[in-house]
Amino acid sequence: MSEHVDGTEGGRETGRSTALLDRLKAGDERAYEELVTEYRERVFRVAWRILRDDESAEDAAQEAFIKVFRHIGRFEGRSSLYTWIYRITVNIALNKLKRDRFRQMLPLGDLPRRERRPSADPVRMAESSEIGERVSKAVAALPDKQRTVFTLKFHEGMSHKEIANVVGCSEGTSKANYFHAIRKLRKLLEDLNEDAL
């Protein structure tokens, strides 16, 4: 069986994940460095997609890793380590968002992505950038829970069961939030080609 992205096999921690977890609980600082190296980019990306600001997302990611380090002894293994870290990150980001509502949102297109390939056609690039900015603004306009569920499902590829664990809701609530987010995005972007979503 292949290893899931969250470091679990069939819902259980893999041997590698378990060994890392044991070392973290024992206070091994190298294990903490490995954890940060392994999850840094994904944690930052999730925080950024909620907060839409590099500095705020970096602060949220750092705060999440500090909280993980301080509270690793309380981790009971009812979810995967990955899911627990994401839950902490999402909660921190949502709390920051509530405290700082007036902050200017950045478009999703500003986040550097490895998978992007440069296009030789400047007109296509301009159209793509404009569409990306429109989509980003539409996502930013969603209510917090819907935006979080949409981000975790659409961008992170998480299942509704995983999202429910991260957000702290039922699987049905996750599905409902995703459904409403998609419906609102379609309405906000109805003038775009359906393939753009």
Image: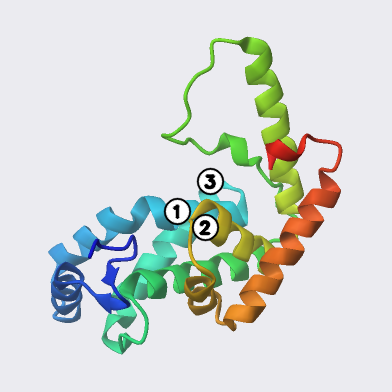
Residue 109 is situated, as x and y percent measured from the top left of the image, at 60, 35
> What residue is at 40 percent from the left and 60 percent from the top?
62
**What is the distance, in whole Å, between disc 2 and disc 1 at their CAs?**
5 Å
Q: Can you tell which quarter of the image residue 141 is in?
A: bottom right
> Quick one: label 3 or label 2, which is nearer the N terminus?
2
Residue indicated by mark 2: 47
Q: Secondary structure at mark 1?
A: helix
The quadrant of the image that shows the C terminus is top right
As drawn, 51 above or below 137: below
Residue 76 is situated, as x and y percent measured from the top left of the image, at 31, 89
**Camera-side mark, 3 or 2:** 2
Q: Which mark is residue 54?
A: 3
Judge by depth and name the residue closer to the eye, 196 or 155: 196
Give amino acid for label 3: Asp
**What is the distance, in whole Å, between disc 3 and disc 2 at their CAs?**
9 Å
The quadrant of the image that shows the N terminus is bottom left
Residue indicated by mark 1: 44
**What is the distance, in whole Å, between disc 3 and disc 1 at their CAs?**
9 Å
